[in-house]
Image (tube, rainbow, N blue to C red):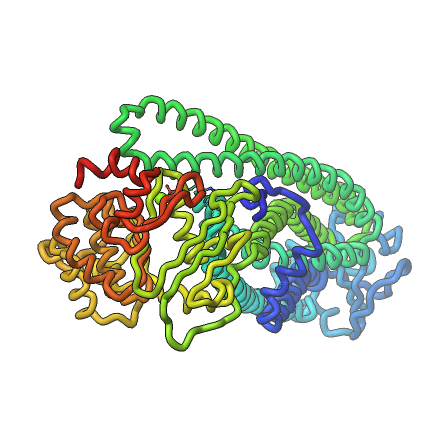
Amino acid sequence: MSDHFQGDDILGKAFDAQLMRRLLRFLRRYKGLFLVCVLLTLGLAGIELTIPFLTKTAIDSFMTLPRSVVTLPDAPSEGSPIDLGENRYLVETLTVHPEVRREWEEADLLSIERYLYIAQGTEEASYPERFPEAFTAISGGWIATEDQLGALPLEELERLRGGSISGIVRLAVLFLFVLLSRFVFGVLQMYLLQYTGQRVMYDMREEIFAHVLRLPAAFFDHAPVGRLVTRVTSDVQAINEMFTSMLVNLFRDAFLVLGILVVMFQLEWRLALAILAFFPIIVLAAWQFRNRVRAAYREVRKQIARMNAYLQESISGMRIIQVFVQEKKANDRFDDINQSKYRADMRQLMTFAVFRPLMSFLSSFAIALVIWYGGLNVLRGSLSLGALTAFVQYVRMLFEPVLRLSEGYNVLQAAMASSERIFRLLDERQEDPGRGVTLDAFQAKIEFKDVWFAYNEEDWILKGVSFVAEPGQHVAIVGPTGSGKTTIIRILLRMYPIQKGQILIDGVPLEELDLGYLRSQMAVVLQDVFMFSGDIMDNIKLRSDISDDVAIEAARFVNADFVEELPDGYHTEVKERGVTLSVGERQLLSFARAVAFDPSILVLDEATASIDSHTEHLIQNSLRKIMRGRTSIVIAHRLSTIREADNIIVLHQGTLLEQGTHDELLEHDGLYAALHSLQFAELD
Ligand SMILES: Nc1ncnc2c1ncn2[C@@H]1O[C@H](COP(=O)(O)OP(=O)(O)O)[C@@H](O)[C@H]1O
Ligand SMILES: [Mg+2]
């Protein structure tokens, strides 16, 4: 039994290879699906990368040219005009002959960046004559500015622009296709990812609960219920979050960052370098943020656990709080916890509130830098306008993965802590199933041979207890509170292993018997009866192979008449573990359970303590009938049951003081005689 089981304070490493390996085991069955998810994600990232590039192409290839048209007898003398064929050239302002440029400058035409230059001998060379309103005469030729070009008929314009309009249409179609495939990929990826995540969670919950079902009683002595519930629900959810949002995004983001950097260096390495200079700042900010978030997150978790525990306790104990008029105290205590939770939440929120705008500021700053430096280069002609536009988009895209990665740290850490808790639970030793021995004919002889037992090592609760219950015999256990009576029953049911001595059933050591077989031979009626959700019928049956008739017969047999007076009879819903039934009624149902079960061994632990003497008297006969022919171990307060026992065991602080029949023990005049005169005399 680990003392660290509770583990709400676990907040270890963000990444633990060993834990991760165990986690991936859950994923193994779905590794094909997961691989598809990763591939889809990478595909999505690839698509993301192409979008700014498409914008760049649209701008550079189709939108910025040609802005104006010049017809001159000779080709430009300087620079390297782009030959468009058919005597047409694309000319940058800077490459135009200096004299011509001076003339343009005087005519205030120099703000125009690109020209389509048309030499003589082409059809377009006749434009100035055909459309004089669009052209201005310059030395040796004509020029049409962007504004003036509007005067040309549309089909001529289309021709002049060399098919750029249809090019834009084609590009727009391509763009649409890219966006559409991003959508389809996105939906597919999301679906597959969530599907895989949900399947993994399902498996995990299944495995955890199956494991918990096989844990020994000793485990539950130390494990708070609320925390076990958390293991199956929120801890599993935290791991799912890591798988679905974190792990897959990790691939995507790494791929994106790398891709963006490559593209940026290709476009303009100096600008890319300048952006890269920002990285240390971003990483530093993210790291700072991570530390803060970590501390805040730890505090929030702690406060949530505290609040849950307090709420759980006070709501289940609300009746006591109200009866003892402790509302104010409870309220003050809650207020205190609530305050701490509020403060922890605010701190966490503030951390995020500062970090996100800070990152957005940094990214805006980087974009401003790009516009400033890139803009200058565009004016100088060393960077195209499209490249600048793409750059701005890439910078924006670059910051997102970094942001996600630093926030994802949280998710990763939570998942690691959760998986550590889950694995710690899964590592708890299961109940020893025994060596699988079953008996051909179960006689139900019980023999305790010098049995020593301690819940916690060396703190002996039973000290050398020996007794025999022959088949069909009734053994009563008597002793003061805390003397170890219930403990004898627990070790007989093999809820706890004994340390010394032997318990034999029909001569076979208890631990060799198949656990399921052993327990199916016994029925137990305890003082505190646990009722499950469902109706009364379900609660009597418990075992599904019992018929309704048998259950009803059993209930009548133990005089549980009250059931038939309930509005819905046997189909009355059991609420909240049976709070609407009295303790005595629950005990009667528990008797009915035992009778319906038809066990070879019957164990009653103060089973009639909450039944009034009138009702007890009524069921006394049925009790005798139930016990007939079965080996019974009975812990009882009232003498009537005890007096008829074949053997009475008297326990005192875990030691068997005396045993014998009622008469023998009275004659012996020991503890039993003393208890008898003190406790039982008045009831006799
Ligand atoms: N789950 C447990 N873990 C540790 N100690 C226990 C546990 N259950 C009972 N004890 C201790 O064992 C002793 C015997 O308890 P129990 O057998 O319930 O007594 P009885 O039924 O005779 O009143 C008590 O001192 C009790 O404190
Ligand atoms: Mg007890």
Residue 243 lies in quadrant: bottom right
Q: Name, please, the residue furthest toward the right.
A: 78
Residue 27 lies in quadrant: bottom right
Q: Residue at x 41, y 69 (%)?
A: 517
* Residue 138 location (% of width, % of height): 78, 55
Q: Is residue 113 left or right of residue 397?
A: right
Q: Residue at x 34, y 48 (%)?
A: 477
* Residue 412 location (% of width, % of height): 62, 50
Q: Is residue 604 left or right of residue 93?
A: left
User: Which quadrant does ligand 1 occupy?
Assistant: top left
- Quadrant placement of the C terminus: top left
Can residue 93 be seen here? no
How many numbered circles does the render carry?
0
Q: Is residue 313 above or below residue 407?
A: above
Between residues 496 and 537, which one lies in front from this camera angle?
A: 496
Between residues 32 and 38, which one lies in front from this camera angle?
A: 32
Q: Residue at x 44, y 42 (%)?
A: 654
Q: Residue at x 20, y 66 (%)?
A: 551
Q: Is residue 136 above or below residue 629?
A: above
Residue 390 lies in quadrant: bottom right
Can residue 393 be seen here? yes
* Residue 508 location (% of width, % of height): 47, 67
Between residues 162 and 119, which one lies in front from this camera angle?
A: 162
Between residues 121 and 504, which one lies in front from this camera angle?
A: 504
Q: Is residue 337 above or below residue 545?
A: above
Q: Name, please, the residue furthest toward the front.
A: 667
* Residue 238 location (% of width, % of height): 54, 51
